[in-house]
Image (spheres, rainbow, N blue to C red):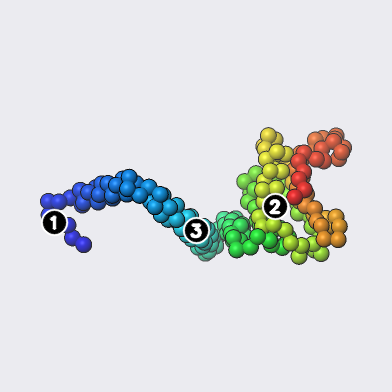
Amino acid sequence: MSVAQGFPPTWLISGMGITLMTLAFYLTLENPDILRSELTEQKMSMLYLKSQVNPHFLYNTLDTIRIQAQLNGDEKVAQLLMRLVSFFRHSVKVDRSMVTLDEELELIEAYLDLMCVRYPKLKCNVDVASELYDAQVPNFILQPLVENSLLHGLKNKGYCGELHVSAEKSGYADYRVFAKAFKKAEGATPSQYRRNFEVQP
């Protein structure tokens, strides 16, 4: 599309913008309910598209960067990006409300790997028996649990300490998951430092 000489493109863009704003204002006065309904529908459509496109675009881009880092011989950066890609892949499970405990643990392990790189004095341990891997749990329930455990247990200590994630069977079909963050003090007994934060979803 060409623009006539002496008529700057910015004038055309501004004119179109003013026209659209005027039309929107007129429609608001004439049919506020209809416009509001249409805008709400458009907003929901945009949110849906963003939820579908953005995560995939993000982790695909990160994976491309990871491959490039690996080709350049930077294995440490490549491994870090691989964990970040894994975290994003597992966190975008919008099609299911329930997932296996094993899937949630893969997400948590990727998240904790990244946190340990960010905070070198943080030590993390995930201890869950393999017979519990197939247990069904709500989608994305463990990451907030673990994050809150770190926040309340170790943030004020500069994330210097230990985080333990464990699970146990408490009944025929019931399971309990624990996240414990604590900092060991010299000379302290386990009962003195064991529990800073614990949640049972």
x and y, in percent, of residue 26 in the image: 29, 47
Mark seen at residue 48? 3
- Which residue in the structure is indicated by mark 2? 142
**Which residue is more in the foreground, 160 or 97?**
97
Q: Which amino acid does label 2 sit on?
A: Leu
* Displayed quadrant of residue 135: bottom right
Disc with the residue nearer the chain's start (3 vs 1): 1
x and y, in percent, of residue 5 in the image: 12, 54
Q: What residue sits 27% from the left and 46% below the top? A: 22
Left or right: residue 151 versus residue 175 is left
Closer to the eye: label 2 or 3: 3
Q: Is residue 50 visible?
A: no
Disc with the residue nearer the chain's start (1 vs 2): 1
Left or right: residue 33 versus residue 70 is left
Disc with the residue nearer the chain's start (2 vs 3): 3
Helix, strand or loop at mark 3: helix
Whole-angstrom CA distance, mark 2 to mark 3, is 24 Å
The crowd level at tag 3 (other Cα within 10 Å; few <14, some 14-19, many 20+) is few
The crowd level at tag 1 (other Cα within 10 Å; few <14, some 14-19, many 20+) is few
Left or right: residue 130 versus residue 144 is right
x and y, in percent, of residue 127 in the image: 79, 55
**Which residue is more in the foreground, 132 or 116?**
132
Q: What residue sits 15% from the left and 51% below the top? A: 7
Helix, strand or loop at mark 2: helix
Closer to the eye: label 3 or 1: 3
Q: Which amino acid does label 1 sit on?
A: Ala
Whole-angstrom CA distance, mark 3 to mark 1, is 40 Å
Whole-angstrom CA distance, mark 1 to mark 2, is 60 Å
